Image (cartoon, rainbow, N blue to C red):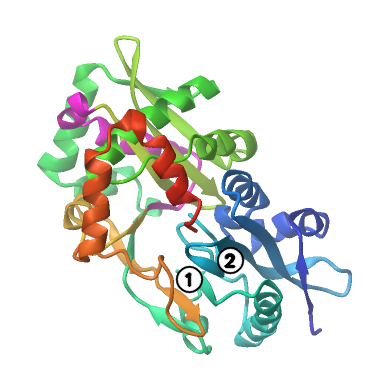
């Protein structure tokens, strides 16, 4: 059987079983579920989602590639799979399937007048490397294998940087539970914004986490963990999950409790919950090799490092191709966000996000 290939809207893809396919395909992930696609489309007005789908004789989805057209007067027009996702592999089983998909993507690129195509990969790198796309190997991801069991994982945690921090948080009486309201999600975002300012990063658009709560959380595809001390919310963690994998996406902690192991305790609570849910992998997220502090933090958990390359066609291009702390322009931007008062950061951050993706 030779599957046909069609470019579908989110609604058309859902009607043809896209989400059922994502849930069973070996390369499917939460970032390809239409709930995540809706989250991105509802948050970032410069994006338009497409599901380039392999269809069987009954017009049901067999595989595919979720793409967004990202269009900006400042950064141009491109096709990206998928903005603000960890990675989004083409859901394919062979080189032939990828070539069929890619021909349709090229037609879509011509239709949208896109200057380049960008695909973020993890598990399809061998097939993509055989294509005409150009790889950039820069970021890494770090994961934990939950099938080893929590006891075995605990033994590999760094004694002072992880184990002692978790025990300190427990002794302090920090309580962790799932969020129960959008107001708690709002407080989580405010704490995260303060953390990002200290790192020289812009705050997220408020609509992003509102849409995660609206589209993903009701389906069990995202969770917000809330940490409280003496009845006051002091931190939180946003996770994404589908099938065997949980992604530790965003952690937020009050600065006064950072040394008391709040961040480590939030991760540990999420690990325990994932183990109870019979998940197999906990992915701690993509990291720049130049951010050695974060790299060492993740390695202290006994994580395994993997390449998460980005593939470009026809050439490497665009603001997402590198994220190099040694770049003078990038360092100047980080300084800007560190010095910008948080109460005034809304307008410049919205401007910046209007051109990202």
Q: Residue at x 35, y 44 (%)?
A: 202
Extreme residue toward the right, this view: 58
**Between 340 and 357, the one nearer to me in the picture:** 340
Residue 163 sits in which quadrant?
top left
Secondary structure under tag 1 reads: loop
Mark 1 sits on what residue?
123
Q: Give the labeled residue for mark 2.
A: 26
Q: Is residue 22 above or below residue 117?
A: above
Name the residue: 17% across, 27% down: 260
Task: Answer left or right for 225 relative to 59.
Answer: left
Q: State the image quarter where residue 106 is shown.
A: bottom right
Of 327 and 296, nearer the camera is 327
Q: Is residue 330 left or right of residue 213?
A: left
Residue 255 in the image: state x and y as whole percent. Answer: 21, 29
Q: Is residue 178 visible?
A: no
Residue farthest left in this picture = 160
Residue 126, position in %: x, y? 47, 82
The answer to whether 328 appears left or right of 81 in the picture is left
Residue range highlighted in magenta? 255-284
Residue 199 picture location, percent across and down = 24, 44
Mark 1 or mark 2: name the one nearer the start of the chain. 2
Q: Mark 1 or 2, which is nearer the eye? A: 1
């Amino acid at each position: 059987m030779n599957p046909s290939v069609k470019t579908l809207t989110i609604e058309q893809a859902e009607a043809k079983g896209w989400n059922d396919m994502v849930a069973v395909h070996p390369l499917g992930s939460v970032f390809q579920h239409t709930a995540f696609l809706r989250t991105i489309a509802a948050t970032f007005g410069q994006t338009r989602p497409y599901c380039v789908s392999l269809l069987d004789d009954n017009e049901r989805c067999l595989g595919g590639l979720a793409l967004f057209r990202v269009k900006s007067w400042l950064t141009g027009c491109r096709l990206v799979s998928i903005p603000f996702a960890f990675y989004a592999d083409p859901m394919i089983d062979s080189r032939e399937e990828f070539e069929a998909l890619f021909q349709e993507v090229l037609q879509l690129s011509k239709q949208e007048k896109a200057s380049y195509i960008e695909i973020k990969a993890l598990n399809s790198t061998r097939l993509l490397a055989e294509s005409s796309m150009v790889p950039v190997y820069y970021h890494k991801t770090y994961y934990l294998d939950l099938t080893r069991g929590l006891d075995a994982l605990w033994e590999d945690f760094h004694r002072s940087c992880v184990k002692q921090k978790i025990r300190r948080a427990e002794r302090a009486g920090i309580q962790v539970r799932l969020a129960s309201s959008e107001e708690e999600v709002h407080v989580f975002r405010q704490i995260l914004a303060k953390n990002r300012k200290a790192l020289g990063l812009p705050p997220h658009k408020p609509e992003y986490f509102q849409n995660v709560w609206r589209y993903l959380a009701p389906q069990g595809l995202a969770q917000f963990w809330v940490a409280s001390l003496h009845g006051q919310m002091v931190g939180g963690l946003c996770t994404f999950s589908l099938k065997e994998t949980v992604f530790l996406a965003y952690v937020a902690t009050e600065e006064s409790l950072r040394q008391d192991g709040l961040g480590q305790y939030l991760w540990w609570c999420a690990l325990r919950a994932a183990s109870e849910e019979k998940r197999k992998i906990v992915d701690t997220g993509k990291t720049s090799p130049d951010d050695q502090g974060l790299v060492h933090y993740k390695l202290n958990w006994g994580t395994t490092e993997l390449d998460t390359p980005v593939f470009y066609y026809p050439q490497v291009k665009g603001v997402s191709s590198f994220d190099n702390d040694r770049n003078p322009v990038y360092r100047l931007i980080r300084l800007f966000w560190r010095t910008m008062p948080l109460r005034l950061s809304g307008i410049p951050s919205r401007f910046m996000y209007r051109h990202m993706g």
